Amino acid sequence: MNRTEFMERLEELLSDVPQEERRDALRYYNDYLDDAGAENENAALAALVSPENVADSIRAGLQEEEASGSGRNAVGRPVSGQERNAVGRPVSGQGRNAAGRQATGPERPGRKGEAGRIILTVLACIFLLPVLIPLGLGAVILAFSFLVCAAVFFASMILSGIVVLVIGVALSLFALVNLAAFPSSAVCILGGGMVCVGIGLLLTLFMCWLAGKTIPAMCRGFVSLCSLPFHRNKGGRQEERPLS
């Protein structure tokens, strides 16, 4: 039986327990297995024996709580009588940890492995930061330069479209003014002016639309790149299932 099956079965067995007590018990044993770590999880589950055994221990603790109202049971609620160990069974004197070794206190398995991982992480940061920081700054500068170049390109194209549009309007007005004096030349100039108006208007509108689609997406990508080192690890502890 793996951890998921164990916790699901325990929740079913505690369906008749008050919701607050059930939530405390499930949270306690989830934390207990988290502290054991993946390498000691099977040993911790073996120490718990079975979901039925844990559920019986929790009910016994609740009955003692109702009888005397002193002491604390396996999930941290007040009870009386013998002190209970991490798996909910009464003990006296020395207890045993999740791996079955004798211990004089509430030893939490997996601490040495966790400390080793923390030390390795710190050492990796110390040796890699001199390399990662320049690489990160270079990537940010490169992305920012690309963003600026794109903005300048779109701005210049929009400006070019406006200039062509203005030239076309000016040529059209000039042709209309001189249409009576120079009919043939004015018609040619008017045609050229209308072509310039069409090209300038089309270029301006198209570049405005393309910039509106491209620049915001590039800005979001740049912000995501800058905030990448500050993203939290999404691993963490297993999320508890909501109680019904």
Image (cartoon, helix red, strand yellow):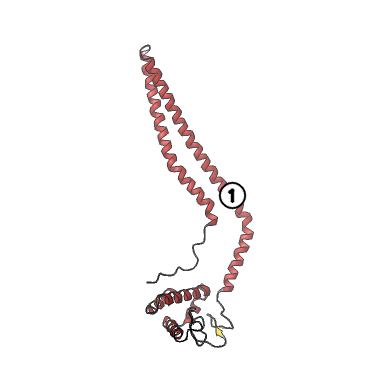
Residue 112 quadrant = bottom right
Residue at left offset 60%, top offset 65%: 120
Residue 162 quadrant = top left
**Residue 83, image x, y percentages:** 52, 85
Please tell me whether residue 52 is drawn above or below residue 197 in the rendered image. Answer: below
Left or right position of 39 against 6: right
**Residue 185, image x, y percentages:** 38, 15
Residue at left offset 57%, top offset 72%: 113
**Mark 1 closeness class: few <14, some 14–19, many ≥20 residues within 10 Å:** few
Please tell me whether residue 118 is drawn above or below residue 170 in the rendered image. Answer: below
**Residue 125, image x, y percentages:** 61, 60
Residue at left offset 55%, top offset 74%: 110
> SS for tag 1?
helix
Q: Quadrant of the N terminus?
A: bottom left
Residue under circle 1?
137
Callout 1 amino acid: Leu
Query: 191 or 86, which lies in front?
Result: 86
Left or right position of 140 against 23: right
